[in-house]
Image (spheres, rainbow, N blue to C red):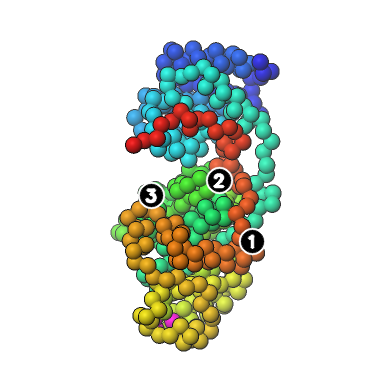
Amino acid sequence: MNAPFKLGPGGRDMFQAYACDDTSVGILTAVTAEMGWQAERVFKGGLRNAVQSLSVSASPQILFVDMSESIDPLTDINSLAEVCEPGTIVIACGQVNDVRLYRDLLASGIQDYLLKPLNIDHVRDALINAQAAFMAPRQEHGEGHTHVATAVIGVRGGVGASTFATSLAWLMSEQAGRSTALLDLDLHFGTDALTLDLEPGRGLIDAIENPSRIDGLFIERAMVRASEKLAILSAEAPINQPMLTDGGAFHQLLEEFRGAFECSVVDMPRQTLIQFPQLMADIQVAVVVTEITLAAARDTIRMLSWLRANAPHVKTLVVADKMQANALEIARKDFEQSIEHKIDIVLPYDMRLAAQAAKLGKPLAEVAKNSKLGQTYAAALGQILDLSGEPAAAGRKGGSLLEKLGDFRDLLPKRGAKQIKEAD
């Protein structure tokens, strides 16, 4: 039996549980007694009772909640996050046997999900793992952490800047293995969330309307997670609603990204760059996406000139997208001479792969990873990391957003997934 203790650091309860039925209450009471915890901290009531109780009292270090009466589990879990302090380790149980729900719950920040009826051995294992996670030494996020901030700017509409931005963010998270934030600053017509088959949510609009709220906890709740290592913040503001901001919220977001992620990719529309030039102070690499046309040559010249004058510290990479060798409006050599900069990356045009990516709701680089286009994207990733001074190889584990706020799942044995059957 573990040594008994009533309170964790800061005077918070070590453990609380909220269960919907008497059988579950009995199992939890028995296991908490074995653990040396206070059995009276097991309450009758489900997830919503937990939210109501914790809204007026401090959350425990380890929290067990029963979701079996919840109609919308993910929404209710988000409500629970609103009243829990950062670092609270949450274990949930419920009757829904669906791998998609299991993954969504893990992505939302809970540690484990158990199926009902509860098994006393499974409950004991889950609480022992939670205690081990809580007692484990916590590595400071800033230790050995270097942030790579990249802005992707299209010189004209339709050149493929957003496609490149989503692909780059995916490459950084999946191929380089780095926790990555994707920020889409086209507030009304941004397509990054759509490209990833996600709902944009209200996070970015809330940040603009209440910049004083922006902190690590806000980032955790507001960002939409595309995968374990990739999260996106975007908007779909009504087109009759101008978003009035001085850019301060954007700057604060980039500052928070620097502490919570290893990489950030900013899909920056031209008008945003012009309106808020101070944002480039946080950027290391600017990817200028263009096409080989006369109008694009003119605008690339102007963009490169602006970057040299206003952001001389930024390393610049020129990407020519949708390249068709037999359909160039002007020769590549003439284009490079006119912009006084070589084209660093040429992305060949592949209509079939682009259509397939759109249908699947996946980044183009993911769908094209086994093609020549995919190889070119991978080369672009290497060049960007080289320009930032970072090694291109996949490497450091840790530093993810959930780890920063107390998610220690990587320290624990992978047991819960065995209980969940793959959905048809």
At which x and y percent is residue 18? 47, 21
At which x and y percent is residue 400? 57, 46
Mark 3 falls on what kind of element?
Answer: loop
Above or below, comparing residue 66 to residue 39 in the picture: below
| Mark nearer the N terminus (3 vs 1) | 3
Q: In which quarter of the image is the C terminus?
A: top left
Above or below, comparing residue 49 to residue 176 in the picture: above
- In front of the other: label 3 or label 1? 1
Labels 3 and 1 touching (C-beta < 8 A):
no
Label 1 crowd bin: few (<14), some (14–19), many (20+), radius 10 Å: some
- Name the magenta segment's main secondary structure: helix
Pick the residue in front: 89 or 357: 357
Q: Mark 3 points at which residue?
A: 198
Q: Mark 1 points at which residue?
A: 390
Mark 1 falls on what kind of element?
Answer: loop
Q: Mark 2 points at which residue?
A: 401
Pick the residue in front: 149 or 244: 149
Above or below, comparing residue 394 to residue 59 in the picture: below
At which x and y percent is residue 189? 35, 61
Residue drawn at 34 percent across, 64 percent down: 352
Mark 2 falls on what kind of element?
Answer: helix
Which mark is on residue 402? none
Which stretch did the figure color magenta? 293-297
Q: Can residue 261 be seen in this view?
A: yes
Question: Quarter-wise, where is residue 136 in the image?
Answer: top right
| Mark nearer the N terminus (2 vs 1) | 1
Whole-Å distance between the Cαs marked 3 and 1? 30 Å
Position of residue 59 in the picture relative to residue 237 (left or right): right
Q: Give the residue type that dot 1 points to.
A: Glu
Pick the residue in front: 173 or 373: 373
Q: Does the magenta stretch include residue 86?
A: no
Residue drawn at 52 percent across, 22 percent down: 122
